[in-house]
Amino acid sequence: MAQIVGGLASSHIPAIGGAIAKGIQQEPYWKPFFDGFPPTHQWLQRVKPDVVVVFYNDHGLNFFLDKMPTFSVGAAASYQNADEGWGIPTLPPFKGCPELSWHLIDHLIEKEFDIVTCQEMLVDHAFTLPLKLFWPQEGACPVMTVPICINTVQFPLPSAKRCFQLGRAVGDAIRSWNSDLKVAVMATGGLSHQLDGTRAGFINKAFDLEFMDSLINNPEWATQFSIHELVEKTGTQGVELLMWLAMRAALGTGSVKEIHRNYHIPISNTATGVMALEVA
Ligand code: DHB
Ligand code: FE
């Protein structure tokens, strides 16, 4: 059966793509953020996943407000990046893993998750940039990918409890996949940030740090909060931390070992977090 080697999480600010393109990762503004990644590269060299299942939220590229699935799973052989208007270069297509996609889809439907299946899917900065941060080598991303979108852009949003259940089901599905491949689960988004409105620039360091700790010590901690409480505590876009919760749930009921974390305020309007967790 397939093995889950661990979990990765990262913020996904579009400006990261500009910094990579310009090669300014070591400039003072960017260094504290990019310095968060080399330890994750060493870990990935060791555990060598073949496939990455990526929980992220589309921001209007693949789904717009006219059609907004709560949960959706990619089932394509490859995923194209497209220009979202941020002025950053697009990245080469990402290889899919249709066999794992369809195994996940079968399992999720059987477990009564009414997901949307996408045999064509454009991927935005929230998918491409974290993959580039964890696999920074030139050219196409070397691992196969399965995108899973959780709606965090148009209300009503799925509850933290439901996202945790989705993550659990995805983890169970991966562990029941008849394959020798090694799988990592990734989350992108967060941590606290608000891009618009009267609270634009809102950041909550105390909550972010407690949330990161909870992923190690008490993974269901954040499921106590309603979506409105999460927006209040983390900002309208900070609610993207639901991806981190789904990722942690996919790692299973056993304990996880924290390989690395980084937390830096701010990049753009966002409190940035990075984590690598190994399944113990
Ligand atoms: C920013 C953060 C995001 O999560 C996003 O999707 C777009 C922009 C930002 O802080 O600039
Ligand atoms: Fe975002």
Image (cartoon, rainbow, N blue to C red):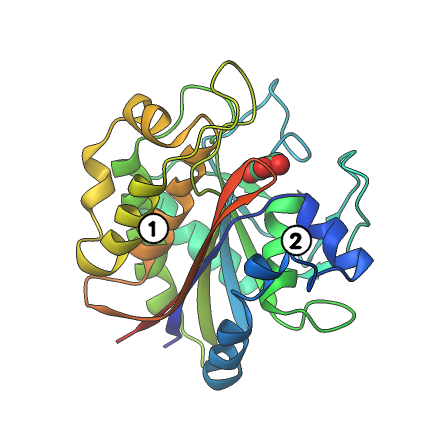
How far is disc 1 from disc 2 in space, using C-alphas? 21 Å
Residue 178 in view of the camera: yes
Q: Is residue 171 above or below residue 51?
A: above
Type of amino acid under label 2: Thr
- Quick one: 78 or 267, which is closer to the camera? 267
Q: Mark 2 falls on what kind of element?
A: helix
Residue 120 in view of the camera: no
Whether label 2 lies within 8 Å of ligand 1 gets the answer no
Residue 156 x/y as whole percent = 40, 20
**Quadrant of res 161:** top left
- Quick one: 229 or 55, which is closer to the camera? 229
In the displayed structure image, the side of residue 194 where residue 268 appears, left or right: right
Q: Residue furthest top?
A: 198
Q: Which residue is mark 1?
A: 167
In the displayed structure image, the side of residue 59 where residue 115 appears, left or right: left
Q: Is residue 248 above or below residue 203?
A: below
In the displayed structure image, the side of residue 176 where residue 117 appears, left or right: right
- Quick one: 93 or 104, which is closer to the camera? 93
| Front tag of 1 and 2 | 2
Q: Which residue is mark 2?
A: 128
Residue 263 x/y as whole percent = 43, 54
Q: Is residue 155 above or below residue 96?
A: above
Residue 29 x/y as whole percent = 64, 52
Q: Mark 1 falls on what kind of element?
A: helix
Residue 260 x/y as whole percent = 40, 69
Type of amino acid under label 1: Gly
Residue in view at x 75 percent, y 36 percent = 84
Image region (quadrant) for ligand 1 = top right
In the displayed structure image, the side of residue 68 where residue 71 appears, left or right: left
